[in-house]
Amino acid sequence: MQLSDFLPVPALESAKRILCFQPHPDDNEVGAGATLAKLARGGCEVIFVTMTDGSKGIADAGLSAEEIRAIRQGEAAAAGEILGVSRQIFLDFVDGETPEPAGMKEAVIRLIREVQPDFVLTVDPWLPYEAHPDHRNVGLAVAEAILASGNRHYLPEGPAPWRVEALVLHATLWPNTFVDVDGYWDQKTAAIRAHRSQFSDEEWQFLGPYFDYKARGYAEGRGCERAEAFKVLPPITLHMSTDTVNF
Ligand SMILES: [Zn+2]
């Protein structure tokens, strides 16, 4: 017996509205782009929240933070168009300087309550060797907000409490859900490449084949050519559970 025998893993592909928090423009596309395109095609409302302004994402010293921010928001809009994203929200925390999770949690709770998604997606903050503070901080802020959003004692003056069905983590070492993304891979790669400032032709020569190799690995034995992998967690597994790694 294991935890999933008592509590089924929520079915990500049944999502009706998914709220996707990314630390930077492009994280959603890299980790989940094909799945989000598939969900959008199936009628799911896909909403992106970009937590930072992306202003450290272009090393070229000739551009100001404001110019980089504008470039990256334009790229995010183009990528969202390709995937079928219905709404984009930018919170503009400073790239590379996000506060500790407690400093972002309130903003995340408010958005979850306003948007009322059944699923919430973000990066896995428990990925070993994750050295980027924005990824650790955003992942944890969203996970903490999942526990609090349905409790009226948090932000009692805020929007009405809302309980989500599950938190969906990508860039995870312990996936429990594999989505067949055959037919959606080209949309994913086009959306990633819409972030022109982030992926040079030179880098794409190894990144493109590497992403493809990973997706083929996730698909092995599942009757499809490519898959994306996720850790789908009901809120109850995010507190005092010794079985969540294996869930
Ligand atoms: Zn990122």
Image: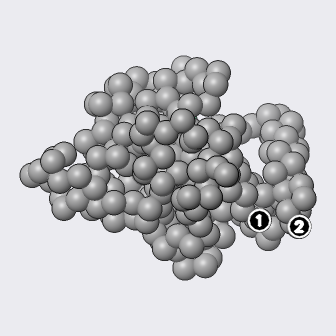
Nearer to me, 61 or 39: 39
Label 2: element kind: loop
Nearer to me, 110 or 147: 147
Q: Residue at x 81, y 39 (%)?
A: 207
Q: Residue at x 85, y 62 (%)?
A: 222
Nearer to me, 161 or 77: 161
Compute the Cα span from label 1 to label 2: 8 Å
Identify the mark nearer the N-term, 1 or 2. Answer: 1
Q: Position of residue 58 (x, y in %)?
A: 57, 29
Q: Is residue 53 visible?
A: no
Q: Residue at x 9, y 52 (%)?
A: 157
Give the numbered dot on residue 223: 2
Q: Amino acid at mark 2?
A: Gly
Mark 1 = which residue?
A: 180
Residue 62 appears left or right of 198: left
| Classed neighbour count for the residue bearing mark 2: other residues with Cα under 10 Å, few (<14), some (14–19), many (≥20) | few
Label 1: element kind: strand
Q: Amino acid at mark 1?
A: Asp
Identify whether 79 is placed above or below 136: below
Which dot, 1 or 2, sits closer to the camera?
2
Q: Are marks 1 and 2 in contact (CB under 8 Å)?
A: yes
| Classed neighbour count for the residue bearing mark 1: other residues with Cα under 10 Å, few (<14), some (14–19), many (≥20) | many
Residue 191 appears left or right of 157: right
Q: Residue furthest bottom?
A: 43
Q: Position of residue 192 (x, y in %)?
A: 68, 50
